[in-house]
Image (cartoon, coloured by chain):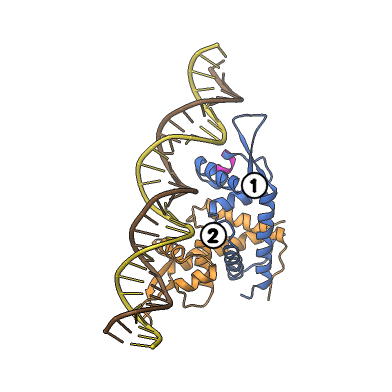
Chain colours: A blue, B orange, C yellow, D brown
Amino acid sequence: MGIELTPNQALDIWCRAAVDGVKRDAPDLSARQMALLLLVYMTEGPHTVRGLSQTLNISKPAVTRAIDRLSKLEMVRRKSDEADRRSVLVQRTVKGSIFLREYSEIVASAAMASTA
Amino acid sequence: MGIELTPNQALDIWCRAAVDGVKRDAPDLSARQMALLLLVYMTEGPHTVRGLSQTLNISKPAVTRAIDRLSKLEMVRRKSDEADRRSVLVQRTVKGSIFLREYSEIVASAAMASTA
DNA sequence: TAAAAACGATACGCGTTCGTAACGAGATTG
DNA sequence: CAATCTCGTTACGAACGCGTATCGTTTTTA
């Protein structure tokens, strides 16, 4: 429905979550990589390189590289599209689910602990 | 005070904010750089390289490089400590304030738009 | 079926970041 | 004073990411 959140509350929560994530030695993902990962997990597929490229407004090679990185971390997986073999479908993995789950709990905890 | 936020709501908001940020062509900061920036703006100073290094649990050169990057973007500024000239104080700037303000509004908007 | 378009990956040159180790400047200690 | 410690930076070689241009494959079009 929508959650009331002042800009300052948002920053306070974000700060706690970001610091906590770095401190825990989580992979140092760039904003692009994180956005791509979240997109794959939080929106309905199928997710193609071209689609992600358009949605994020970045070049296709940038998407390919982000997927390369996230694949090495086993947070997403490539699967060729049987219907159109030119396409590659970006799929979720167990590790990616766990990573985002942990991250979301950090944010939720940060929200609970927020004072601003 | 604390804000009630389920893990799924947190992810939903984060996804909208992250995608929006990338789409707007905001600087592609790494998790470390973002955490350092937020730390400088959201917690009381003075902020030194050593202090930030310990707080984030990363090496001092990594902090120096993050400050290099954020300095080029004019989001933070170095100032030598008059009391101990070995130390460098990391200070806020107008540009940094504006950047975080905009980002926080993206998050707040994402929270309002969230449905999960 | 031949030509054109679409898809994702790769090549390239450049800039950034990494961790470890060493460095110079400044402060502290004996 | 000189030796030592602390602070932040720099040096180094390796890894990664960027955008543009191009490639090979597959699909669509004429």
Q: Is residue A67 above or below residue D30?
A: below
Q: Position of residue A114 (x, y in %)?
A: 64, 73
For the residue carrying disc 1, how many other residues have a C-alpha within 10 Å: few (<14), some (14-19), or many (20+)?
A: many
Which residue, given by chain and number where applicable, does mark 2 sit on?
B31
Residue type at mark 1 is Val
Q: Residue at x 61, y 61 (%)?
A: B109
Q: Residue A40 carries which label?
A: 1
**Magenta span: chief secondary structure:** helix
Q: Position of residue D22 (x, y in %)?
A: 42, 30
Q: In the rendered image, which quarter contains the N terminus of chain B?
A: bottom right
Q: In this view, does A113 lie above or below C30?
A: above
Q: In which quarter of the view is residue A53 placed? A: top right
Q: Which residue is drawn at 58% across and 64% down?
A: A18
Q: In which quarter of the view is residue C25 placed? A: bottom left
Which residues are the magenta region?
A: A50-54
Chain assignment, label 1:
A
Between B65 and C25, the residue placed more toward the observer is C25
